Amino acid sequence: MSQLTTGEYLVDVGDHRLQVDVIGAGPPLLVVHGGMGYGHRGFRPWLDGLADTRTVVYVDLPGNGGSDTPADYDDWHTVSRLSDALHGLRVGLGVDRWSVLGHSFGGFVVQSYAIDHPDDLDALVVSCSTSALDHLDESLRFAREVCVSDEQFESIRDALLVPKATDAEFDAVTASVRSAYFADPGLLGTDVPLPRGGSAAAFNATLRIWAGSDLLDQVPSIARVPTLVLGAARDWTFPLEVGARRTHRLIAGSTLHEFAHSGHFPYVEENAEFLRVVSGWLATASPLPAAP
């Protein structure tokens, strides 16, 4: 496999192009964002430490960030459309196999990717995600415990998981609930910037895809791929029992790690531990090549 070109550029995946942001050197690690709506920017600089030993390929999923919006995007209803796009990206970059990390909705996407294209992957990391969005009642119950105000909880309950008419509406709702995603809400606006410039169309695609996709029956097949499952104790979006722990139980032989002091973004709130856990596990599951 030829060395990947570092920098930001577009890659042809068939009927559209995906933007990547490539840093580091070593075996490739694809990193897939959640959302959707904002692209990969929220990962940086938090995950850049993984580039100490890996070529990290940040990608904007179709319709997100700098990637193209497919002509038939409004008809996308299954997560396989996204996993197929990642397969096309691997081919377009000339990568034989790679490790893959997905966070939140991206964790759902990479589970689908491992199901649909298992030969693409040499290792899989599923971070703060789920295998089926069938636990809204439990998420709301937990959100009620951790949210900072009645108004914020009401926004989560009534305004978050509904289609957005405009990009401005999407940004406004995101801003109103964002601090609840952290165990320490004070991080937002200081160490962590508030996302802006989101895409309502991409977010609405997320809702359609969640509704049209349930991976529970297929996830056990991922056992052929070494898998690390990450969860966080204060994450109300995907509470541990219906999120990371359930996915771990479904994937025989997978490794589970739980972050005790984080909400939905342990790579921010417990950054050093996150990098240590992921890098250390990848070194075992997908060893670095021996020095010449």
Image: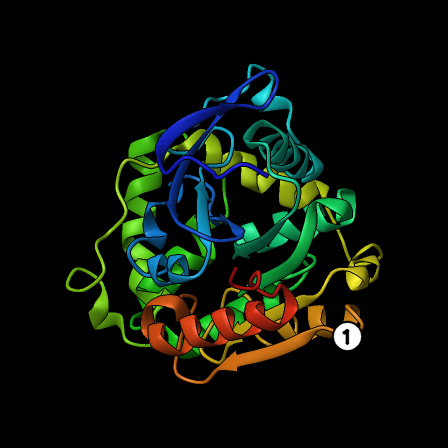
Residue at horizontal 65%, vertical 59%? 123
**Which residue is situated farthest in the front direction here?**
292
Give x and y (percent) for residue 187. Answer: 22, 69
Amino acid bearing label 1: Gly
Residue 85, by quadrant, is top right
Give x and y (percent) for residue 212. Answer: 71, 40
Vertical placement of residue 214 versus 179, above or below: above
Residue at horizontal 30%, vertical 41%? 171
Give the SS element for disc 1: loop
Q: Which residue is mark 1?
A: 253
Tell whether 17 sits left or right of 96.
left
Residue at horizontal 29%, vertical 64%? 179
Give x and y (percent) for residue 6. Answer: 37, 38
The one nearer the camera, 280 or 204, is: 280
Q: Is residue 148 visible?
A: yes
How many discs appear? 1
Vertical placement of residue 124 versus 13, above or below: below
Residue 71, by quadrant, is top right
Tell whether 163 sits left or right of 147.
right
Position of the N terminus by quadrant: top right
